[in-house]
Image (cartoon, rainbow, N blue to C red):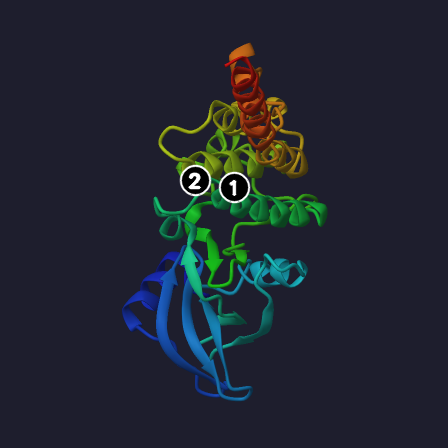
Amino acid sequence: MNPLPDSVMQHLVRVTGEPDLAGTPYELESELGRGGMGVVYAAHDTRLQRPVALKVLYTGAPVMEEARVIASLEHPGIVPIYETGVLADGRPFYVMKLVEGSSLDVYLTPAVALSERLRIFQKICETVAFAHSRGVVHRDLKPGNIMVGSFGEVVILDWGVARRRESAEEAGVVVGTPQFMAPEMRAGQGDEAGHKVDIYSLGALLQCSLPDRPPKALAAVAEKAMSPEPGDRYEDCVALNRDISRFLDGAAVEAHAETAVERVVRFASRNRTLLLLLAAYLAVRIFLFFLRTT
């Protein structure tokens, strides 16, 4: 019997509803989301008495590579894999830690301070940097794939289109989300730039995380990360993260050439306490001077 085409399998999955978890220790609770590779459900592990996330994949190959990629990346910012298996209908599934919280686009309300937004972004950079150090490129970084937990943890989800740098794939394949996709990815040439496609996506994430009128330095950081030419972007996530740290520390960022006025304003902001003390000291000295002369 010939296997059903992927498009037919996806249609059947959508119309047949919930998966049959008979023979597994998991009980289905609710659907969390759907993607191009499969459906993610909240489930209960009756064996260990814990909540889990269970992803049922539409087809068997090569989508199980997602589970293998995640399993190879042990990091606080990447959800761990607990188990993999196959349902009675032949569909593969894998079980992950259930991350409780909000997606980045939901979390970033106007009430969230700029400093907090940037610290979340730095955690994203650190996680992507770790993946890159293991030779894995995510290729679909976007707010909906990033969860901010109840205790400030930041987790990157959906590694379904991630690729190892050394793996070969069909040329001309376009994957990702247009708003956060590097130009070379749209042209089907993402493999040629490697990890630089994630640098572009990080720049787009930073841009959408900033207030409506962001500081020029931060806008410049985002623009550099999103440069049309991969060679003009930051060399890696560490360099991008370093510029964000400079901004948070009140230092000049490499991506922006400051004017003299901007330099003075930044110095005043960075040394506000010292300047206030100096002003208070001068005010007291002036008061004492006039007191003596009267």
Q: Is residue 70 depicted above or below 23 in this figure?
A: above
Q: Residue furthest top?
A: 260
Q: Residue furthest front?
A: 294
> SS for tag 2?
helix
Residue 257 in the figure: left or right of residue 187: right
> SS for tag 1?
helix
Judging depth in this view, the residue of 38 and 108 nearest the camera is: 108
Q: Position of residue 202 (x, y in %)?
A: 53, 38
Q: Position of residue 85 (x, y in %)?
A: 55, 76
Q: Is residue 123 depicted above or below 13 in this figure?
A: above
Report whether residue 91 is seen. Answer: no
Q: For the residues labelled 2 and 1, say whether their Cβ atoms are less than 8 Å apart.
A: yes
At x 70% / y 47%, what residue is drawn? 135
At x 30% / y 72%, what residue is drawn? 16
Q: Label 1, on which residue?
A: 118
Q: Is residue 191 depicted above or below 57 in this figure?
A: above
Judging depth in this view, the residue of 224 and 255 nearest the camera is: 255
Judging depth in this view, the residue of 76 and 27 nearest the camera is: 76
Which amino acid type is shown beneath numbered disc 2?
Ser
Q: Position of residue 286 (x, y in %)?
A: 54, 18
Near mark 2 (Cα within 10 A), the count class, few <14, some 14-19 or many ≥20, is: many
Count the numbered circles shown.
2
Which amino acid type is shown beneath numbered disc 1?
Leu
Q: Is residue 131 depicted above or below 60 in this figure?
A: above
The numbered dot on residue 209 is 2
The numbered dot on residue 45 is none
